[in-house]
Image: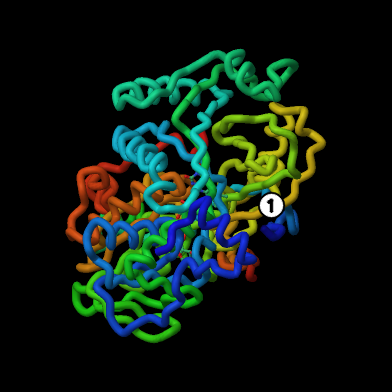
Amino acid sequence: MRLVPCPDCGPREPGEFVCLGDSGGHPVGEDGLAEALYGRANAKGPVEELWWHKFGCRRWLKLRRNSATNEFVP
Amino acid sequence: MRGYSIWALARNALTGHAGWPRAWRSPRPRERYEAVIVGAGGHGLATAYYLARRHGMRNVLVVDKGWIGGGNTGRNTVTIRANYLREESIRFHAEGLRMWREMSGELGFNVMFSERGQIDLIQTWAKLRDVKRRQVLMRLAGVPFEIVSPEAAKARVPILDLDGAKRFPVLAATWHPSAGVARHDAVAWGYARAADALGVDIVQGCEVTAVRREGGRVTGVETAMGFVVAPKVALAVSAHASVLAQTAGVRLPIETVPLQAFVSEPLKPMLDCVVNCPGQVYLSQSDKGELVIGGGADGVPSYVQRGDFATIERVVTSLAELFPVLGRVRMLRQWAGAIDLCYDTSPIVSKAPVDGLYLDVGWGSGGFKAIPAGGAAFAALIANDMPGPEVAPFALDRFATGRPLYETAGASNRD
Ligand SMILES: Cc1cc2nc3c(=O)[nH]c(=O)nc-3n(C[C@H](O)[C@H](O)[C@H](O)COP(=O)(O)OP(=O)(O)OC[C@H]3O[C@@H](n4cnc5c(N)ncnc54)[C@H](O)[C@@H]3O)c2cc1C
Ligand SMILES: [Zn+2]
């Protein structure tokens, strides 16, 4: 895992953060509620996620990362 | 297939070991098959074997982008047990334990199954409540599993330290005598060799790029070696379940997460059972003397087979605290596998919402033990186009119908 780029605190240890997963969610559509609640894109490649800097500034962040390399992309 | 035996060993020793035949062929994929299984891990290979052996389906291709057992099967820490929470899981894994005992004989390949038992050290009140509940359910299923005192655990595991101030003192322990370990590579190789001998084609180094469908039916798979026609396509690809299912328009309730493992330098025999401290660390000692150590899954979804340092710190802290004698032991290797973690941490063995597409995924941190029983059940599902009663509860539609199987007994479960 790479250092996590927090806009407040700069690059910090991943252990300070909680990754809360896909920031997009999935709207309830034709495929139903179960799909929206449980279905996951689980993309291999660029993903946009919510991160919480729990042991730092406690801010919620929206970060882009490549799940195939772990690199954060601006 | 020529059997392996002490006589064959002696005969070949006299001829400089030049006479051993190859364990399996390396064919090019043909144009069409009755069924294509994507993924030559333990699950894909066992499925192919049982399809050929029990259901007479021999015109089958197993295709892998890497090599036989090179996924999680060859990266796992080989604990085999049945002490789960769900009745469905307990019964399924109890049948698995029975199959493990017979596997070396059936495959003609020594998988080194060693039924050495497992001790869980319970360090939180939440976990104690959980194992109390599991003790009742295990009893109902007739599988031995009992809560014992920390001192009883210490008597069995002398390297365990119960003294002094601990962050998480040991409150109780559990004993699961029918748990064990086996040799992971041997399991993959044994099934590969036996499936190949029955006529199954195993093709390595060939990536499947997409499942092709026409309307509501599967027609075959696109591979690096061209299109292969098949009316039945079975996915046993662990980490890449979502990626491949999505090429057929199917979304899964699965996240891909790294799970790490560590191996120490070889030590004198000091641990003759599996020890698990749920959510923190678990270990067993291999026949070579190395301690095989694991912990919980990483917190960040990723396809990278490396793992983050926070997990290493967590595992090592617990290890050194409970087993101070290991505090200065050096680690030889560290690695991760990318596991397919299902939302309720139970597996998916199921028909997909596309005709002819079958799923055996979501095994997460616990699918090695499920290779024989999972392979047999998945083969029956593919052959009959209908799940048997042992895996019917693990259907994909359990989420939509409100019957998820939340599990608490996996290495990736935290409380
Ligand atoms: C560190 C670690 C420890 C573990 N410990 C235990 C344990 O103690 N006990 C236990 O029961 N389980 C354990 N597990 C879990 C267990 O390893 C897995 O659940 C099990 O091995 C899954 O087997 P499989 O055959 O489904 O998948 P894999 O063995 O991962 O095989 C999947 C195969 O699919 C191939 N593949 C993927 N995508 C494609 C594609 N597009 N085209 C072609 N091929 C493809 C891969 O190359 C791979 O070989 C552990 C896992 C890890 C990572
Ligand atoms: Zn911050």
Q: Position of residue B313 (x, y in %)?
A: 71, 42
Q: Chain of mark 1?
A: B
Q: Residues within 10 Å of mark 1 (few under 14, many from 20)?
A: some
Q: Is residue B100 left or right of residue B390?
A: right
Q: Toward the viewer: B371 or B220?
A: B371
Read off the residue under disc 1. Answer: B334
Q: Position of residue B388 (x, y in %)?
A: 21, 48
Q: Is residue B376 left or right of residue B216?
A: right
Q: Toward the viewer: B4 or B261?
A: B4
Q: Toward the viewer: B413 or A22?
A: B413
Going 54% across and 27% down the picture, which residue do you hit?
A: B120
Q: B412 above or below B67? A: above
Going 74% across and 50% down the picture, which residue do you hit?
A: B332
- Secondary element at image label 1: strand
- Amino acid type, label 1: Gln
Going 37% across and 60% down the picture, which residue do you hit?
A: A26
Q: Can see residue A37?
A: no
Q: Specify the quadrant that holds the N terminus of chain B.
A: bottom left
